[in-house]
Image (tube, rainbow, N blue to C red):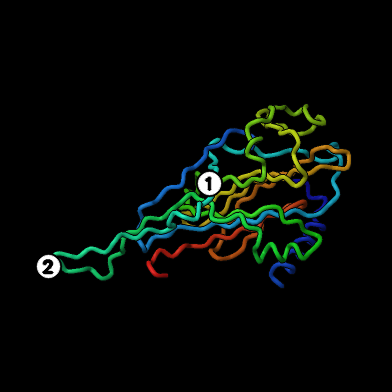
């Protein structure tokens, strides 16, 4: 990524933190919601992602490296929670035989609904703070529940505003197509009639010795000449639970937080 605008990035970083905290291009896999058999002392996690753009005028495509990242073949497209399925299912209590001594501290089993989108609501405190500042444009929010994936092979989840009916209706291009400077990846796919501020990408949460978030995101803009301009962000970051993490680009940003879900009944 070119660093010629680094002073602008720093100023935007300061403004963003002050404002907030006071200081599909290839076929993807649609994931079915599934119940995981777990114990109440185990953990599952909610991942909350907010994508926003900076309201900046757009250059002609000849002046930028108009390149986008390509999603992996194993990225999962999650389906929304229907609101009726139980997120947590606890087995009914059963009476123990007379000769059985209960183990008070033994973790009880629980079924946990995973790989499910919990919310895409834009009614959120972080988004409300972004809206209050004319510099930023909130684009999308997605919150989902998942088990952590392996650090060396993270499982990516799709985060996209690309219309579902166009995700697999693009046409393949090479680096000489679309203003002669769109992408140097021969299997990249361009979708017609993309709206300004469209995003399409993937986010993974992994856990090994430490916890990490992996982000690959494309932002599509339309310049004054009607040309499609694309910006790519690819970052990986070690994270702390319950803390908002910031992934930065000159043109847009991503805020993400991972929260451990309590599985104890009644909590």
At 75% across and 62% down in the image, what residue appears?
131
Q: Closest to the observer: 2 or 231?
A: 231
| Quarter occupied by residue 106 | bottom left
- Tag 2–tag 1 contact (CB < 8 Å): no
Give the mark, 2 or 1, whose residue is nearer the N terminus: 1
Where, by quadrant of the figure, is residue 199 drawn? top right
Q: Nearer the viewer, residue 110 or 242?
A: 110
Would residue 130 be found to the left or right of residue 101 on screen? right
Q: Is residue 100 above or below residue 2?
A: below
Q: Residues within 10 Å of mark 2 (few under 14, many from 20)?
A: few
The numbered mark at residue 79 is 1
Check disc 1: other Cα within 10 Å, few if <14, some if 14-19, many if 20+: some
**Residue depicted at 47% across the width and 43% down the height:** 32
Q: CA distance from mark 2 to mark 1?
A: 46 Å
- Position of 107 compared to 18: left or right? left
Q: Residue at x 55, y 46 (%)?
A: 157
Q: Position of residue 176 (x, y in %)?
A: 78, 27
Left or right of residue 187: residue 5:
right
x and y, in percent, of residue 23 in the image: 71, 72
Total labels drawn? 2
Determine whether the residue tagged by mark 2 lies in a helix, strand or loop: loop
Residue 93: horizontal and vertical position, in percent?
Answer: 26, 64
Residue 189 numbered mark, or none: none
| Picture disc at residue 98 | 2
Provide the secondary structure element on which disc 1 rests.
strand
In the image, farthest residue toward the right = 225
């Amino acid at each position: 990524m070119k660093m010629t605008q680094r002073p602008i990035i720093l100023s935007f970083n300061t403004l963003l933190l002050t404002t907030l905290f006071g200081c599909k291009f290839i076929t993807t896999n649609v994931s079915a919601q599934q119940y995981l058999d777990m114990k109440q002392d185990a953990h599952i996690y909610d991942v909350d992602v907010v994508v926003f753009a900076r309201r900046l005028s757009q250059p002609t495509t000849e002046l930028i490296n108009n390149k986008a990242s390509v999603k992996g073949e194993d990225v999962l497209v999650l389906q929304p929670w229907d609101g009726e399925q139980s997120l947590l299912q606890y087995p009914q209590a059963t009476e123990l035989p007379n000769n059985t001594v209960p183990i008070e501290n033994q973790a009880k089993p629980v079924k946990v609904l995973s790989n499910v989108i919990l919310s895409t609501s834009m009614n959120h405190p972080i988004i409300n703070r972004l809206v209050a500042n004319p510099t930023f444009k909130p684009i999308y929010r997605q919150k989902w529940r998942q088990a952590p994936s392996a650090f060396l092979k993270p499982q990516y989840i799709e985060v996209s505003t690309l219309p579902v009916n166009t995700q697999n209706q693009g046409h393949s291009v090479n680096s000489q197509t679309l203003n002669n400077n769109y992408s140097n990846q021969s299997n990249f796919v361009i979708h017609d009639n993309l709206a300004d501020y469209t995003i399409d990408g993937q986010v993974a949460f992994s856990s090994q010795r430490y916890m990490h978030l992996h982000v690959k995101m494309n932002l599509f803009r339309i310049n004054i000449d009607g040309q499609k301009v694309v910006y790519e962000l690819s970052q990986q970051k070690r994270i702390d639970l319950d803390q908002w993490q910031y992934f930065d680009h000159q043109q847009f940003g991503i805020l993400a937080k991972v929260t451990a879900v309590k599985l104890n009944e009644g909590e």
